């Protein structure tokens, strides 16, 4: 079944034509008022961003969606899930602090922030999908029990998926750590001849699968979760994936998880996608 897709530019020629006004117009044009009803608990799925970065949707823009939902009588909450790797979003306490530091607090977005998979990513439900890779998938408990879902996604690059948008925001973003691990399920390739023994991979690995012995890293593939943090951090490029073999099934697994995130919510899910920040690298010849 085809969907009607609405586009608008971010160019503003007047105060009535700014991004805030356009979000409200898109909400109405796309019929998102039909998604959430009176008294419904509506999850507004966002990405709060990694601590210290600015790669997330401006919370002032998220507020416009929240206000539209509240005007309908819905009870929206702004939600995300904890990460598979360490850092500022690995548990709900740190994750909530990161969200607040980036402006996602009640005074700005007008709704409570809820980390949907619980304090240590253990609030989850098994959702039946009968896919190619999974018969059931693990979805954050508060996403599953929400009455309706509005998915706000920002366009981004991603190590494995190439580009991330609504499918990644659903598949990865609505899964607890255990579900994220099921989707990745990839194993790195290690080239010891390139390893410089710096230990950054061991320090970064969330599952302690990497050790450094005699200035050479060693990966315990039984403990490895396949998150790809070691690949991202390695300055010597001694770690890689078999991209041709491992990436296509990864994308399929992520799509199946996206299906699980919206299962049981037919007619109760809406999407808004944002492409607002384009990073350009300009090289100058030094004469």
Image: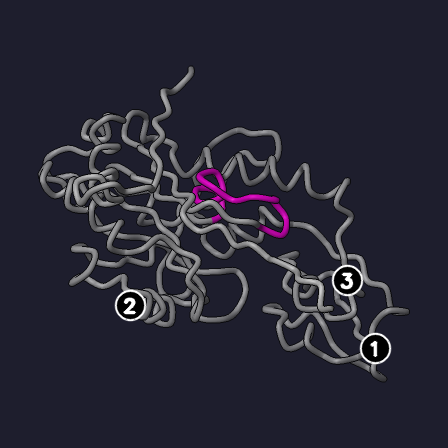
Q: Which residue is mark 1?
A: 216
| Mark nearer the N terminus (2 vs 3) | 2
Up-down relation of residue 76 to residue 24 (above or below) = below
Q: Which residues are magenta?
A: 158-172
Q: Is residue 171 magenta?
A: yes
Helix, strand or loop status at disc 3 = strand
Helix, strand or loop status at disc 2 = helix
The residue lying at 18 percent from left, 55 percent from top is 111
| Mark nearer the N terminus (3 vs 1) | 1
Q: Which residue is mark 3?
A: 239
Q: Position of residue 35 (x, y in %)?
A: 23, 30
- Distance from disc 2 to disc 3, alpha carbons, whole Å, reads 35 Å
The residue lying at 58 percent from left, 39 percent from top is 253
Helix, strand or loop status at disc 1 = strand
Which mark, residue 186?
Answer: none
Name the mark nearer the viewer: 1 or 2: 2
Which mark, residue 100?
Answer: 2
- Distance from disc 3 to disc 1, alpha carbons, whole Å, reads 12 Å
Nearest the eye: 58 or 171: 58
User: Can I make out residue 225 in this image?
Assistant: no
């Amino acid at each position: 079944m085809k969907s009607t897709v609405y586009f608008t530019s971010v160019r503003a020629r007047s105060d009535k034509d700014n991004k805030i006004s356009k979000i409200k117009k898109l909400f109405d044009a796309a019929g998102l008022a039909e998604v959430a009803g009176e008294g419904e608990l509506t999850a507004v799925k966002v990405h709060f961003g990694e601590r210290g970065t600015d790669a997330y949707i401006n919370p002032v823009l998220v507020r416009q969606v929240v206000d539209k939902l509240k005007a309908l009588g819905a009870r929206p909450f702004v939600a995300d899930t904890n990460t598979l790797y360490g850092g500022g979003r690995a548990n709900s306490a740190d994750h909530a602090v990161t969200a607040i530091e980036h402006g996602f607090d009640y005074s700005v977005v007008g709704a409570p922030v809820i980390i949907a998979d619980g304090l240590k990513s253990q609030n989850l439900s098994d959702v039946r999908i009968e896919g190619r890779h999974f018969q059931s998938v693990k979805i954050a408990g508060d996403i599953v029990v929400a009455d309706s879902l509005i998915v706000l996604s920002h366009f981004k690059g991603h190590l494995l998926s190439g580009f991330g948008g609504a499918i990644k925001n659903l598949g990865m973003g609505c899964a607890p750590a255990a579900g994220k691990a099921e989707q990745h399920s990839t194993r790195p390739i290690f080239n010891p001849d390139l390893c410089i023994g710096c230990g950054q991979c061991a320090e970064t690995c969330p599952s302690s699968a990497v050790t450094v012995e005699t200035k050479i890293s060693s990966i315990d593939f039984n403990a490895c979760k396949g998150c790809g943090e070691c690949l991202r951090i390695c300055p010597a490029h001694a770690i890689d994936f078999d991209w041709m073999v491992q990436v296509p099934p990864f994308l399929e697994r992520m799509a199946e998880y996206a299906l699980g995130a919206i299962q049981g919510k037919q007619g109760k899910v809406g999407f808004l996608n944002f492409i607002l920040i384009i990073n350009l690298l300009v090289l100058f010849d030094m004469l």
